[in-house]
Amino acid sequence: MLTITAYDRYVEQLFEVIKRFTSALSQAHIEYRIIGGMAVFLHVNERNSMAARLTNDVDAAVKRTDLDAIIRAVEPFGFKYRHTAGVDMLVDSAKPSARSAVHLVFVGEKVRAEYVEPVPEFSPPARSVEGALIAPVADLVRMKLTSFRDKDRVHIRDLDSVGLITPEIEAGLPEQLRVRLAQVRASE
């Protein structure tokens, strides 16, 4: 007999958070893109579910000018806005935790001052099977190579391993990010 595991419950919880968040913003006609590890997971999963690694949170790119409207839109969906340690997030009203929050980053702004590039402006999105708007692979590659933490390098490997980083995407990168991509590929 198969039983639901803690991992399965966690996956369901993450997708429930995404569903509530995307429903709130869609109903309010607010543009967003799911980014970060969850977006990588969704793209890789479409190509090869065995190569997809789950992330532990949800990240979304939004416009800073929409922040007040976002805060109002998500309240009926059980989220509360918090700004903690320099991070803008939407936490679950019932169980506030940064680990289960939607972390917001703002298009056109650098997440950290030392980053090479700002978060890309909205490009035409991909759409998950659940209907969530996901940042296209080219934008994810730029963001992952810009932040370049260990987990970002792993996400780059995951995207590359299933053929999502095309020669066109690579050619569109600025030199510094192409060098970083080469470093990731050389370390495999």
Image (cartoon, rainbow, N blue to C red):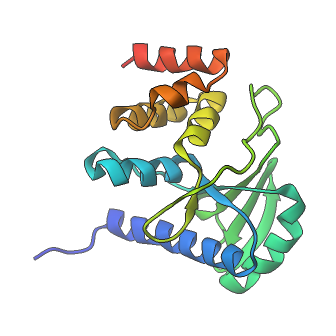
Residue closest to the eye, 15 or 182: 182
Quadrant position of residue 59:
bottom right
Counting from the top left corner in percent of width and height, residue 96 is at: 67, 70
**Is 138 displayed left or right of 117 in the figure?**
left
Residue closest to the eye, 6 or 78: 78
Residue 98 in sight here? no
Q: Residue at x 41, y 65 (%)?
A: 11
**Is 57 displayed left or right of 161 in the figure?**
right
**Is 68 displayed left or right of 73 in the figure?**
right
**Is 44 displayed left or right of 90 in the figure?**
left
Give the residue at the far front of this rendering.
168
Counting from the top left corner in percent of width and height, residue 1 is at: 10, 77
Counting from the top left corner in percent of width and height, residue 40 is at: 48, 47
Counting from the top left corner in percent of width and height, residue 85 is at: 80, 48
Residue closest to the eye, 118 or 111: 118
Give the residue at the far left of this rendering.
1
Q: Residue at x 61, y 27 (%)?
A: 172
Quadrant position of residue 20:
bottom right
